[in-house]
Amino acid sequence: MLAKRDPRTQSEGVVAGYAQTAQRWPSQPLQARPLTPSELTGPQQLARRLAPVRGDLAGYGEKRAIGQLIRLRARIVDEDGVPVSGAVVEVWHCNAAGKYIHPNDTNDAPVDPNFYGAARMVAGDSGLIELRTIKPAAYPVPDTAGWWRPPHIHFSVWGRVWLSRLVTQMFFPGEPLNESDAILNAIRDPEARRRCIAQLALTAKGPQDALVYEYQIVVRGRGASPSLR
Amino acid sequence: MTRLVPTGEMTLGPFFPREFAAGANDLAAGVQQGEVIEITGRVTQLDGKALDNLVIEIWQPDSQGRFDNPGFFGWGRAATDANGVYRFRTIKPGGYEKRAPHINFLLLYSGLMRQLQTVMFFEAAADPVLDAVPASLRHRLVAKREGTVYRFDIRLRGEGETPFFDD
């Protein structure tokens, strides 16, 4: 069985400084429900339906995206620490000027013709994905009182069952804007927040051309059982 | 064994790549067995505004109520358009055990700090999940049939608010 979400380590509801939450989070309490096979199964071999696209967003030579080159090593595990091999992982982030490829991004920042900020990968047997990309920039959130998002990378991850689905954001260490971000700080537990921040690996050990960041994502669920049915 | 704490969910944000949401809303393509149906609806917020680029994922059994049918994938994803409208083409699911036919919905969007879970039913039948909702609200989880199209509008907050689940 899945444990209930812990409100200290999970965010929800209406968040101060993030006006859209007051338009969109339900006003009524969420309903408890019994868990049945319907919630405790999930798509198997999702990678067949959602095939990998672009494991490298940085490019090379004349096609190299502008920005600090990074290699992101993220490990997907369950609550027992067991790697979720075969997990589909989608990431997206803005360019080194703070601009997304999405047409709805109205920020007045330049597009980088060599940067397309979306990738889909499949975790290997050790639950690892590696992404070569550039470090995203901070950017201002329109129509707010000076809210700037710290540099972050969006993650969309599938665990083993329907209720393991996880969408989150990964932050970078040492960023002053981390301290005031309405989204990161909606997680009340300081340790849980810290785990949303990647760690910079020792530069002497890594590849010489890029900074290496390491990150771990824990999806809901225990043990290697693919489903409870 | 030490139990790890699941990573905190965070909002999808407004810039989920359109290519990820595209092309995954037809669950019926190539499926041999079952009744092909369309599910559509409009998603709105407190002030009634329709929501653009909101992501909906669904999970359902096949026409016989099975989740392990290699000929039916059972999962799909769609994004709302500028009018707040989403569409799926799928197979009408079968019931199983105590569950009436239903489709699980998961919503992701900017301003939603985490996923919202709800369930679409085809009729107000006895079902342990539908029965967990107050009787006066159950009709909001039952789609309206228009031929082979089932209409399931979703109100995130405010009048006619859709019931959502906590789990």
Image (cartoon, coloured by chain):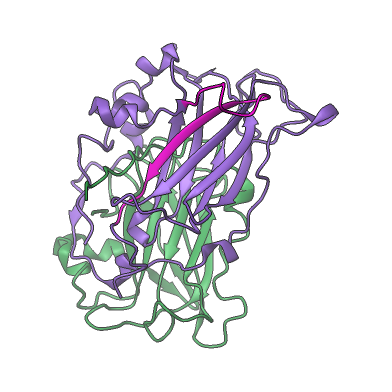
Q: Residue B15's quadrant in the figure?
A: top right
Q: Is residue A66 visible?
A: yes
Q: Residue A56's quadrant in the figure?
A: top right
Q: Name the residue rendered at 42%, 44% in the picture.
A: A167
Q: Which range is magenta? A: A200-221
Position of B75 with respect to A101 (left or right) is: left
Residue toward you, A33 or A177: A177
Location of residue B47 in the rendering, given as x and y in whole percent from the top left corner: 37, 37
Q: Quadrant of the C terminus of chain B?
A: bottom left
Depicted B41 relative to depicted A143: above or below: below
Residue B123 on the magenta segment? no
Name of the residue lying farthest toward the front: A205
Residue toward you, A128 or A196: A128
Q: How many marks?
A: 0
Residue toward you, B130 or A149: A149
Position of A19 with respect to A74 (left or right) is: left
Q: Name the residue rendered at 55%, 34% in the picture.
A: A72
Q: Which chain is green?
A: B
Position of B47 with respect to A86 (left or right) is: left
Location of residue B121 in the rendering, given as x and y in whole percent from the top left corner: 32, 71
Task: Tell me the colour chain A is drawn in.
Answer: purple
Q: Name the residue rendered at 18%, 72% in the picture.
A: B128
Residue toward you, A79 or B73: A79
